[in-house]
Amino acid sequence: MERFAKVFESYGRQFLIRKDENDDGDAALSITTVFEGAEMTVSLGFGDNDDAASKALQVFDQKAADVIGKKLEGCGNAFEAFKALST
């Protein structure tokens, strides 16, 4: 069975990791979480390399979710989260 999504919990948040397409129609890995009812998604693009996006989803694990969860710890909204991920 080919997976298209995984869900992780880390630092009090849920993260949905999904093989997707970006706005340009290119293969992407989307990482989604929610802040006060507002959904925040970060998209990692892979161009036309669908296999690379599939591999990224396959290797994304709890440890990777914990790295993101730790960065977002204490963030109260998506703007704070975006700033935290930028550093």
Image (cartoon, grey):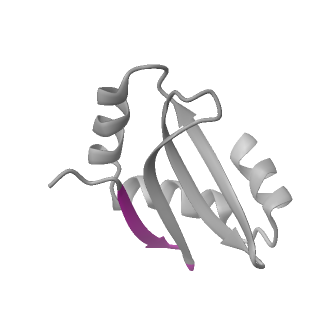
x, y percent for residue 70: 58, 62
Residue at 65% across / 34% down in the picture?
Answer: 23
Q: In the picture, which quadrant includes the C terminus?
A: top right
Question: Could you say which is closer to the camera, residue 71 or residue 19?
Answer: 19
Q: Check the image and report above or below for 56 versus 25.
A: below
User: Would you say residue 87 is visible in this rendering?
Assistant: no
Q: Is the magenta stretch mostly helix, strand or loop?
A: strand
Q: Residue furthest front?
A: 25
Q: Residue furthest left?
A: 1
Question: Could you say which is closer to the camera, residue 76 or residue 74?
Answer: 76
Q: In the picture, which quadrant includes the N terminus?
A: bottom left
Q: Give the range drawn in magenta.
A: 5-12
Q: Check the image and report above or below for 45 versus 73.
A: above
Taking 82 as reference, is 73 left or right? left
Residue at 75% across / 58% down in the picture?
Answer: 81
Q: Residue furthest right?
A: 79
Taking 85 as reference, is 13 left or right? left
Q: Check the image and report above or below for 7 versus 42.
A: below
x, y percent for residue 37: 75, 78
User: Is residue 80 on the magenta stretch?
Assistant: no
User: Would you say residue 16 is visible in this rendering?
Assistant: yes
Taking 32 as reference, is 16 left or right? left
Q: Check the image and report above or below for 36 versus 24.
A: below
Taking 81 as reference, is 2 left or right? left
x, y percent for residue 55: 28, 36
Residue at 49% across / 71% down in the picture?
Answer: 10
Instruction: Quadrant for residue 51, please give it.
Output: top left
Residue at 67% across / 62% down in the picture?
Answer: 72
